[in-house]
Image (cartoon, rainbow, N blue to C red):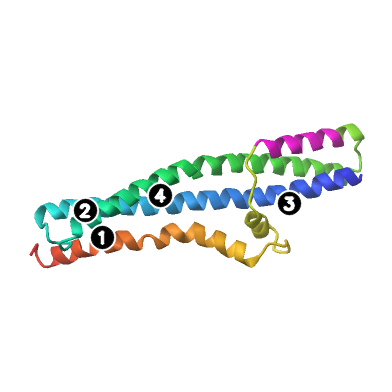
Amino acid sequence: MIELDRIADRSYKTYKARLKAAERLQARQRAWNTSLLALAVATTIASIALLSDDRMYGSAGPTVLVCVSVAALVASLVVAGLNYGVRSRDMFMNYRAIQRLSVEAEAQQQRGVFDDDSVRKLSERYNALLDDSENHTSADYGFSDPTAAVSKWTLRATRVLTFLPYIALVVPILVVLPFAAWAFRGGQ
């Protein structure tokens, strides 16, 4: 019974933490997609605008825009390498499988009918599911269990990293502002 209780408890905590991990990865994918799309649109508008007025962004404007474009390319390659979408989907599938295992373990607990073989099989399935996926972070665990001993700094850092691409939207706004001012002046 002790082993079954341990599996039920661990699988429940793991599934909740993996749920938070899937949500974190999905949020980061959305944030980076939004930021990179805005940056691509802004640099394209700025590049086209430079064809009409090569002084629109000042004497260093074209160089700055090339640097911003290169930074956008580097960011997009890094984000593509982090593979947030696929990792989020994998984490989702894993947490759903662990959730099913957790429900099974809880059902066996409630029925009070189990044997060493069924508990061993549950344990083997749980371990296989752990091996089948990347691990969640300590912050994911902290978000899933507010009583967990996870530092507030770790939780804040995770939130900031997830929100950072939205903060980066300042760059495309700054890139488009000179064009908007130029357009409102009638292209002069």
- Under tag 3, what secondary structure? helix
Whole-number angstrom distance, CA of label 1 to CA of label 2: 9 Å
Q: Quadrant of the N terminus?
A: top right
Residue corresponding to mark 2: 45
Res. 33 mark: 4
Residue type marked 4: Asn
Res. 175 mark: 1
Residue 124: give x, y in percent of width and height.
79, 34
Q: Is residue 130 magenta?
A: yes
Whole-number angstrom distance, CA of label 2 to CA of label 4: 18 Å
Residue type marked 1: Val
Res. 13 mark: 3
Are dots 2 and 4 in contact, CB under 8 Å? no
Q: Is residue 49 left or right of residue 157?
A: left
Where, by quadrant of the figure, is residue 125 drawn? top right
Residue 107: give x, y in percent of width and height.
82, 43
User: Badge 4: how crowded within 10 Å, few (<14), some, or many (20+)?
Assistant: some
Where, by quadrant of the figure, is residue 78 drawn? top left
Q: Which residue is at the front of the view, 149 or 120? A: 149
Where, by quadrant of the figure, is residue 143 drawn? bottom right
Whole-number angstrom distance, CA of label 1 to CA of label 3: 45 Å
Q: Residue at x 86, y 43 (%)?
A: 4
Q: Is residue 36 magenta?
A: no
Q: Identify whether 106 is placed above or below 176.
A: above
Where are the magenta residues, as a range? 119-132
Of the two numbered discs 3 and 2 on the same chain, state the one appearing first in sequence: 3
Of the two numbered discs 2 and 4 on the same chain, state the one appearing first in sequence: 4
